[in-house]
Amino acid sequence: MDAKTLDGRDLAAELVREARVDAAEDRFFTDRANMDMADRVISIAALVFVAACVCALLAHVLFV
């Protein structure tokens, strides 16, 4: 807040503005964490799929 003296309405408006900024930051970081978790899940699923394909190819080469 500024160094000037705020009356009641200005003070309330400033507090609401700060609360909205804080809420927006919280939503941003929560969405980011959820996106990171989704990226991890997709990466693990892709890794498992590739490992299964490699095992199937290796089994085909060795046993057929």
Image (cartoon, rainbow, N blue to C red):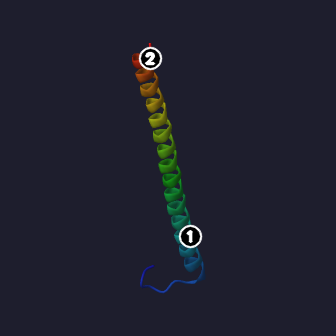
Q: Name the spot of residue 40 as percent of width and height, x first.
A: 47, 46
Farthest residue toward the top? 64
**Which is nearer the eye, 39 or 56?**
56
Instruction: Name the element at disc 1.
Output: helix
Which residue is pictured at 49% across the width and 58% down the height?
29
Rendered view: 30 above or below 3 = above
Residue bearing mark 1: 19
Q: In the rendered structure, which amino acid carries the disc numbered 2?
A: Phe
Q: Name the spot of residue 16 as percent of width and height, x first.
A: 58, 71
Which residue is pictured at 44% across the width and 32% down the height?
51
Rendered view: 19 above or below 1 = above
**Does residue 44 appear to the left or right of 8 in the view shown?**
left
Q: Indicate the quadrant where residue 11 lies.
A: bottom right
Residue bearing mark 2: 63
Q: In the rendered structure, which amino acid carries the disc numbered 1?
A: Ala
**Which is nearer the eye, 56 or 47?**
56
